[in-house]
Image: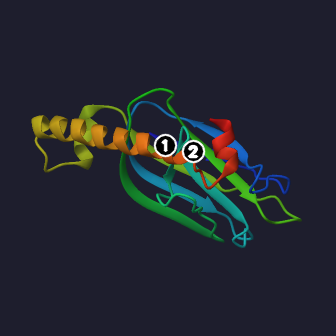
């Protein structure tokens, strides 16, 4: 499944008061991320994707994506195994005249048989073991992120959670 959301970001959505959009997804494995910034954004429209208060993409905390006329597209393996089944997308606009509408697309598989497609050389039993290890590591990273969010580079992210 590919989940898509357009984030129309007005000039009133600033770095201190960003647009918060919610992309509802299902439980599963994220295998693809895309963020499309139309021509004309001129690097003025900024975007981050969070899982709760934890910044997932871009992976560097405090950084944002903000290209012009470009699609950021890459494969990833991120487990979305606990509710709420959604990603929080924050955008803000430094343009004083025009709104901008980046689009976020997230590819996610839900069935174990399809998850195996993205990890073809791994036997199913080994895959389940790896999945458990990845989940533990991801949960540790999320917990570290929650602790770090107390020192969040984005004050609005700290206030919301």
Apparent side of residue 1 relative to residue 152 in the rendered image (left or right): left
> How many discs mark residues in the rendered view?
2
Residue 33 pos. (x, y %): 47, 53
Q: Quadrant of residue 92?
A: bottom right
Q: Quadrant of residue 71?
A: bottom right
Colour theme: rainbow
Disc 1 residue crowd, few under 14, some 14–19, many 20+, Cα 10 Å: few
Quadrant in which the C terminus appears: top right
Disc ID at residue 28: none
The residue beneath circle 1 is 147
Residue 46 pos. (x, y %): 67, 61
Residue occupying image coordinates x 57% and y 44%: 150
Q: Are marks 1 and 2 in contact (CB under 8 Å)?
A: yes
Quadrant in which the N terminus appears: top left
Is residue 17 or residue 8 the one in the foreground?
17
Residue 60 pos. (x, y %): 49, 61
The residue beneath circle 2 is 150
Is residue 102 or residue 144 the one in the foreground?
144
Disc 2, SS: loop
Residue occupying image coordinates x 18% and y 35%: 128
Apparent side of residue 32 relative to residue 126 in the rendered image (left or right): right
Residue occupying image coordinates x 11% and y 34%: 125
């Amino acid at each position: 499944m590919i989940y898509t959301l357009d984030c129309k970001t007005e000039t009133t959505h600033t770095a201190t008061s960003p647009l918060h959009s919610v992309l509802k997804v299902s439980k599963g494995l994220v295998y693809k991320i895309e963020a499309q910034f139309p021509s004309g954004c001129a690097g003025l429209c900024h975007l981050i994707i969070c899982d709760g208060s934890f910044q997932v993409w871009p992976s560097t905390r405090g950084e944002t994506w903000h290209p012009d006329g470009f699609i950021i597209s890459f494969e990833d393996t991120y487990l979305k195994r606990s509710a709420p089944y959604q990603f929080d997308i924050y955008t803000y606009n430094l343009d004083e005249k025009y709104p901008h509408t980046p689009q976020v697309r997230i590819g996610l598989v839900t069935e174990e048989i399809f998850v195996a497609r993205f990890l073809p050389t791994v036997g199913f039993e080994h895959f389940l073991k790896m999945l458990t290890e990845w989940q533990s590591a991801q949960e540790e990273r999320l917990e570290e992120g929650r602790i770090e969010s107390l020192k969040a580079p984005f004050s609005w992210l700290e206030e919301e959670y």
